[in-house]
């Protein structure tokens, strides 16, 4: 029976106490009831401790741990380490999930045992509103940049297999690295036809605070770490890059997809430097 499967929702929190109630309420509202939610206080100096403990009193499925500040990857790993669930869903403390997200994700996994990652459609809220339109998943796109947001479900056994989130990625892109690690040896990805993730846009955020050098360092680190994955998809990436160039030349380029082009061009420069091609 599907409802006997435990899923662990991992909520790291650092300077996000003002949003934590909304995130945890979205977990409490799930139509799927067999979950635990582990709140990880990553050494936050605000009142995360007080708010988290209130939720553990409200419902015993909420658990709370405190650790010294070590960054997002470290906080997620700490929560997953003690998680009892077969499946894991990371949820940042300033975001929210839809009521059926856990239920539909677990159903997808149980129907298709080849699945490694399940995610859904996403909507932005806060400083910016509207659907967040991401390209369909493919490995050639994953080589260049991340198309799966952090709040996607996976098996704890896969987290163990790849050694968890890379704690050296202190400048972000830890999700991208993690998805590559899980998927590069095979397995399928499913995007649910369901709006189940709500991503808060703020004036200040970790990803927006990165400078160009930090971003490039992280991208180069991920590519270097996963050279086997990069090389196995190189021919397909080159074909897609050439197609983009031809579309630009014919004025067929959709400028809403300019990020894909920028990442493709970055990847091409990176490959030239790395492999002298």
Image: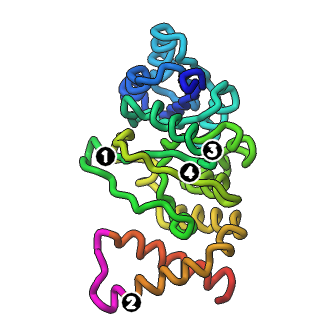
Q: Specify the label residue 175 is tagged with.
A: 4
Q: Residues within 10 Å of mark 2 (few under 14, many from 20)?
A: few
Task: For mark 3, give the secondary structure.
Answer: loop
SS for dot 2: helix
Distance Cα–Cα, label 3 vs label 1:
31 Å
Closer to the chain start, of discs 1 and 2, is: 1
Task: Identify the mark nearer the N-term, 4 or 2.
Answer: 4
Q: Which mark is residue 161?
A: none
224 vs 147, left or right, is right
Cβ–Cβ under 8 Å for marks 3 and 2: no
Is 270 located above or below residue 9 in the figure?
below
- Mark 3 vs 2, N-terminal side: 3
Give the residue at x 62% y 51%.
178
Tell me the CA gap for discs 3 and 4.
Answer: 22 Å
Location of mark 3 (residue): 113
Please say whether residue 108 is one of the residues in the magenta stretch.
Answer: no
Res 186 seen here? yes
Residue 253 counted in the magenta span:
yes
Compared to 97, does 204 lie above or below? below
Instruction: Kindly report which numbered mark, 1 or 2, lies closer to the viewer in this rendering.
Output: 2
CA gap between label 1 and label 2 equals 32 Å
- Quadrant for the N terminus, please: top right
Secondary structure category for the residue under label 4: helix
Question: Of residues 35 and 277, which is closer to you in this image?
Answer: 35
Q: Nearer the viewer, mark 3 or mark 4?
A: 3
- Residue wearing tag 2: 246
Q: Are marks 4 and 1 in contact (CB under 8 Å)?
A: no
User: Mark 4 or mark 2: which is in front?
Assistant: 2
Residue 21: x and y in percent read 38, 23
Q: Which residue is mark 1?
A: 124
């Amino acid at each position: 029976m599907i409802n006997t499967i435990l899923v662990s929702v991992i909520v790291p929190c650092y300077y996000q106490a003002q949003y934590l109630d909304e995130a945890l309420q979205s977990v409490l509202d799930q139509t799927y009831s067999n979950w635990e939610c582990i709140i990880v206080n990553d050494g936050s100096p605000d009142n995360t401790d007080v708010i988290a403990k209130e939720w553990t009193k409200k419902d015993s499925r909420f658990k709370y741990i405190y650790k010294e500040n070590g960054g997002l990857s470290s906080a997620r790993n700490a929560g997953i380490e003690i998680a009892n669930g077969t499946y894991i869903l990371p949820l940042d403390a300033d975001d929210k999930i839809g009521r059926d997200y856990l239920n539909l994700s677990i159903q997808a996994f149980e129907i298709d045992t080849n699945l490694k990652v399940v995610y859904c459609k996403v909507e932005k809220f806060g400083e910016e509103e509207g659907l967040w339109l991401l390209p369909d998943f493919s490995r050639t796109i994953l080589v260049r940049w991340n198309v799966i947001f952090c709040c996607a479900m996976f098996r704890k056994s896969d987290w163990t297999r790849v050694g968890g989130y890379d704690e050296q990625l202190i400048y972000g892109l830890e999700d991208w690295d993690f998805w590559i690690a899980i998927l590069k040896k095979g397995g399928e990805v499913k995007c649910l036809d369901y709006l189940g993730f709500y991503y808060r846009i703020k004036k200040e955020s970790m990803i927006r605070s990165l400078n160009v050098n930090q971003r490039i360092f992280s991208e180069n680190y991920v590519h270097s770490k996963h050279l086997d994955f990069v090389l196995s998809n190189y021919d397909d990436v080159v074909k897609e890059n050439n197609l983009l160039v031809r579309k630009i030349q014919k004025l067929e380029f959709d400028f809403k997809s300019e990020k894909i082009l920028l990442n493709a061009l970055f990847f091409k420069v990176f490959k030239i430097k790395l492999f002298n091609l």
